[in-house]
Image (spheres, rainbow, N blue to C red):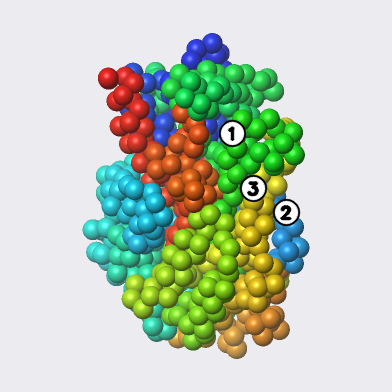
Amino acid sequence: MAPRTTAKIHEVLNRPFDFVIVGGGTAGLCLASRLSEDPNISVLVLEAGSEQFDDPKLRALNVVAELPQANLTLPLVLPAQYGHHFGQPEYDWAIKTTAQDFSNGREYALTRGRVLGGSSAINFLCWTKPPADEVDDWERLGNKGWNWETFQKNLRKLEGYQPPDDPSVTHHLNVSNLKSQLGRDGPIKLCHPATITEPEIKAFEAWLELGIPRAPKPYDGDPNGAFFCAMTVDPSTYTRSYATTASSLAFYFPCAARENLNVLTSASVNRLLTKVTQDGLLAATGVEFVHAEQTYVVNVTMEVVLCAGALKSPQILELSGIGNKTLLEAAGVNAHLNLPTVGENLQEHMYTCLTYELSPDADDLALHILQDPQVYKEHVEKLNGHPRAGAFTLGISGFAFVPLQAISDRGDDIIKAAREKFEKREMYPPGLKEQYELQLNRMERTEDRAAHCEVILYPGFFSFPNPPEDGKKYFTIILATNHPFSRGSIHVTSSDPAAPLSSDPRVFEEEIGDYYREFYDAELFANLLVDLQVFVELVKFGRRVACTSPLQEVLASPLKEVNPGPDVVTDEQIGDYIKSVCDTTYHTVGTLSMLPKEKGGVVDTELKVYGTSNIRVADLSIIPLHIAAHTMTTAYAIGMQAADIIKENIIKVHMHG
Ligand SMILES: Cc1cc2nc3c(=O)[nH]c(=O)nc-3n(C[C@H](O)[C@H](O)[C@H](O)COP(=O)(O)OP(=O)(O)OC[C@H]3O[C@@H](n4cnc5c(N)ncnc54)[C@H](O)[C@@H]3O)c2cc1C
């Protein structure tokens, strides 16, 4: 299908829109496609990034036809899914954090998609879903209607899973189990990597040896255990299936011909223009944005929906004068609505890696070999062959979601200490105590314990600080934590939309952003850093996996751990390794939390910003408590539920009486 181009600036000027959606990313495009189903509603999406429709970088595995013309300079044409857009302004916001005290002073670069499709256009393609109970926790926190039943119903409409038919792989993938749990006809195409390597299969078997069960229902509410996940790849073309998707008929392309839907790219929103209504609420009347270095305003007749992601939606609210009054005034922004928790309750997943040398007779196929341009070209041809082959057919798909107690015999002690710390504390900022209680309960209960920890298989070299050696083959075990106690914040520092944000995830500090600082008892919290201690146990578990059959047999003998390496032995050394090399998994949530206002909420259950009449948020900012899953499915589910809310409650009232 030939892509329809997006709107031109003259097409969107001098006319009002019923809805303006800020951010054409994962949730934003999903929402736009649903809202514009009603031809009576005009929808404008303003996206800061460009389309990049024809860019081989974006359509990772779809590069084949375009490669002869493509620039093979590294790292631009390497597959999109594994970090090759990082730091490139035409794709990545790369928002710098403040120096992190508990990460040896490092500043993280928070990668987020800055392109039509948002982070779904550059992410790592892994389709995972949270446990039912953790989605239900959002409802337990006071958000009626935000539960697993709705989440799952919406996602099943989106899923277009195609199971493989090769009997030699279906057994490993447990396809008969997955088939019944995933939707088959939806627009987001899902399949498994065409190649799963021997070390991945052996590592999976090592997990089973270590007592990790196969996940009973990874896509139906119980992902605890081991499974091979599906990827957002269209099996018919082997291309990325994402929010914009050209080839897989997802959200933008099928709707692009609708006259009531306009998507303007390279349109960076500065702020909302507002007025106070007769009821004393703040109402958005227009949206100010920059396109081709010119500033414009578009008027809105019904609502503005912020879908700019958990790092950028708070900025737009703050620049519009909605946020912590003191902080806004310090930044030189006129405060119109004092909402002190805007930009707070930030929660992030973290990961670190262990890399092992493979035995010399292991297969050469690995993701990192594509960094060599010559090898890259050869593997593009292999991808184009019949059957598809080569490193482009690999993926990141081996997952184990595990409770702390399942990987460490110190698990109970750590959880007990966390409970004691929690009980000793006298003051909590509004809402945090309830969140921590749920988190502790997830860990403490004896049945259906939550997966605090996650282990992921990476076929290749992916770790720091020691580099790979030429001619050697490698396998990496990625370790991630899912339920951080740490709370951070993100805020503007200036009224200039282009000025850097102050982003402080407070990694491993288990505490609280600026607004919460007055509640902070540093001495008490210095005793035990639960988030870090869990991570240390996880690294030890990763090492046990490497020493377990049958994985051990495909690794070099004697065992050679490249990172962190044999010198990193004690808990303190492991903790220090983690602090020096770990990174965020690009899963920030919570910065505009959906909670009762007195519990620190910024939006209500209809996603409306408290104190406003027509400003909503529909992206990962609203998630009040983090989950044991990667966040793409949640972003799509939010887009779907937001559409239902808006359609039911607003369109019905305004348009159809
Ligand atoms: C590198 C990477 C790998 C990941 N891998 C996975 C994975 O394998 N599996 C998984 O489940 N999740 C993964 N994730 C996470 C997941 O993709 C994201 O959490 C999810 O897509 C976020 O959706 P969103 O709608 O909240 O925001 P986004 O999809 O990021 O959309 C926000 C949009 O708003 C736009 N925007 C921002 N500010 C403005 C402004 N001022 N004006 C106009 N537009 C603006 C942005 O350019 C962007 O297009 C990954 C994320 C990244 C970055």
> Can the viewer see residue 75 in this picture?
no
In which image quadrant can residue 266 be found? top right
Q: Which mark is residue 196?
A: none
**Mark 1 or 2, nearer chain start:** 2
Cα–Cα gap, marks 3 and 2: 10 Å
Report the amino acid beneath label 3.
Answer: Ile
Q: Nearer the viewer, mark 3 or mark 1?
A: 1
Report the amino acid beneath label 2.
Answer: Thr
Residue occupied by mark 1: 337
Above/below status of 383 relative to 448: above
**Mark 3 or 2, nearer chain start:** 2
Cα–Cα gap, marks 3 and 1: 18 Å
CB-based contact (under 8 Å), mark 1 and mark 2: no
In which image quadrant can residue 325 be found? top right
Give percent across and percent down for residue 281: 50, 28
**Mark 3 or 1, nearer chain start:** 1
Residue occupied by mark 2: 98
**How many marks do you count on the picture?**
3
The residue drawn where x is 33% and y is 36% is 644
